[in-house]
Image (spheres, grey):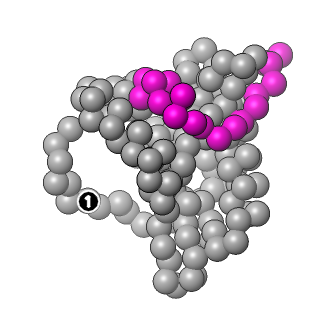
Amino acid sequence: MSPATTVRAASESDIAFLVDCNAAMALETEHKVLDREVLTRGTSTVFAEPQRGFYRIAERDGMPVGCLMVSYEWSDWRNGDWWWIQSVYVTPQARRSGVFSALYADLEKQARGTSGVVGLRLYVEKENRNAQATYQALGMNDSGYRLLEAGFVEL
């Protein structure tokens, strides 16, 4: 049986963990090595400029085992904000044991209790079937949209 998972707001003291998680996620999912200096600045900016979003941390026995970030997208159609789930990572030893489910349940409760939030969204790699199954089991559905981008900064 897995130990209990608790979820809390991240703080600036978590930046090193968040940077490690983001670097590991980029390498595992997209085979990209991120510039840790840029990543540290990007992570720190979320704390310095809270309008950018926020992080949540999952812990077991007082140790961080997972995280996610939320950023905001205004919807004029709904007159409110979508909360975009980004930078999801669960440490290898804690995977498939309910850590992301705990993060998601905590976030959904927070979102439903926050005025002006119209829903949760995320994007997932097309080939990441395990993640897709997890998200669908939690009640998320394919939105029918394709994600397109025109990037201006190379990784």
Rendered location of residue 21, percent (x, y): 46, 27
Rendered location of residue 113, percent (x, y): 76, 63
Looking at the image, residue 69 sits to the left or right of residue 140; the answer is: left
Pick the front one: 23 or 11: 11
Q: Is residue 99 above or below residue 70?
A: above
Rendered location of residue 95, percent (x, y): 62, 23
Q: Residue at x 73, y 46 (%)?
A: 106
Which quadrant does the N terminus fall into?
top right
Asked if the stretch drawn in magenta spans residue 34, the answer is no
- View extreme (front): residue: 48
Rendered location of residue 155, percent (x, y): 20, 38
Q: Secondary structure at mark 1?
A: loop
Q: Residue at x 35, y 32 (%)?
A: 40
Looking at the image, residue 121 sits to the left or right of residue 59; the answer is: left
- Region in magenta: 1-21
Res 62 visible:
yes
Pick the front one: 85 or 31: 85
Q: Is residue 118 above or below residue 37?
A: below
Mark 1 lies on residue: 149
Q: Residue at x 66, y 31 (%)?
A: 58
* Three-letter residue code for mark 1: Glu
Q: Is residue 133 above or below residue 146?
A: above
Looking at the image, residue 13 sits to the left or right of residue 49; the answer is: right
Asked if the stretch drawn in magenta spans residue 2, the answer is yes
